[in-house]
Amino acid sequence: MDGMVQLQKNLFGYTDSLFHEGFLDDQFNQLEQLQDEKNPDFVVQVITLFFDDAERLLKELTTSLSQEKIDFKRMDAHVHQLKGSSSSIGAQRVQKACISFRDFCTEQNVEGCLKSLQQVKHEYSLVKSKLQTLFKMEEELLASRLSDLKVV
C-alpha cells in the first residue's frame, strides 16, 4: 500500500508542476472531468488525437515555409487550427506560441514565422513529453491499484 501512496504523491506533484510551469491550464482539468468509468481512456484518446493533428499541422507549416512563394493565409489557417486544438486540451504554452506565430503570418514576416515555428515545435515537443510521462505515471498507479486488489 505504501508504494501506491508514493505513486499517488508523485503523480499529484508532477501534475501540479505542469500547471505551475504553464504547460497546462484549467481546460485540461475540464477535459479530465469528462472522463468516467464508461470511458476511462477519454483523456488519453483526446490527447493522442491532438498529437496526431499537431504533428500533421507542424509538417504542413514546415512545408509551407520552405516554399518559394509562401501562402501566409493558408499558413495562418494552420496555425489557427493548432492554436484551437492546443487550447481545447489545455496546452497553454503551445497556444501562446501560436498567438505570436499568427501575428507574424499577418505581417507576412518570413523570419518571424520561421522563429515562431521553431518555438511552437519546441513547446509542442515539451508538452508531448510531459503528457506522455503523466500518462505513464497514471498507468503505474492503476497497475499498483489492480495488484493491491488481487492481493486482498
Image (cartoon, grey):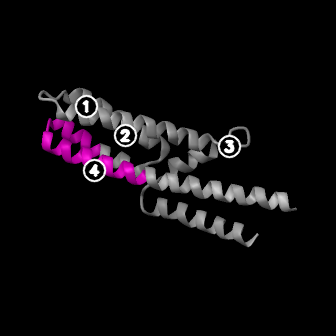
Quarter assignment of residue 83 = top left
Estimate how packed mark 2 is, as few (under 14), some (14 to 19) or many (20 or more) residues with alpha carbons within 10 Å.
many
Q: Name the residue at 64% across, 54% down.
A: 139
| Magenta-drawn segment | 99-127
Image label count? 4
How far apart marks 2 and 3 lie (CA) works out to 26 Å
Mark 4, residue position: 119
Q: Nearer the viewer, mark 2 or mark 3?
A: 3
Mark 2, residue position: 83
Q: Are marks 3 and 4 in contact (CB under 8 Å)?
A: no
Q: Nearer the viewer, mark 4 or mark 2?
A: 4
Q: Are marks 4 and 1 in contact (CB under 8 Å)?
A: no
How far apart marks 3 and 1 lie (CA) works out to 36 Å
How far apart marks 2 and 1 lie (CA) works out to 12 Å
Q: Compared to 26, does 35 lie above or below?
A: above
Mark 1, residue position: 75
Q: Compared to 49, does 139 lie above or below?
A: below
Residue type of the residue flagged with mark 2: Lys
Q: Secondary structure at mark 3?
A: loop
The quarter in which the C terminus is drawn is: bottom right
Residue 117 in the magenta stretch? The answer is: yes
N-terminal-most mark, 3 or 4: 3
Q: Position of residue 15 (x, y in %)?
A: 54, 60
Q: Name the residue at 58% across, 43% down.
A: 43
Q: Secondary structure at mark 4?
A: helix
In-image side of 66 versus 42 (left or right)? left
Q: Secondary structure at mark 1?
A: helix
Q: Position of residue 2 (x, y in %)?
A: 73, 72
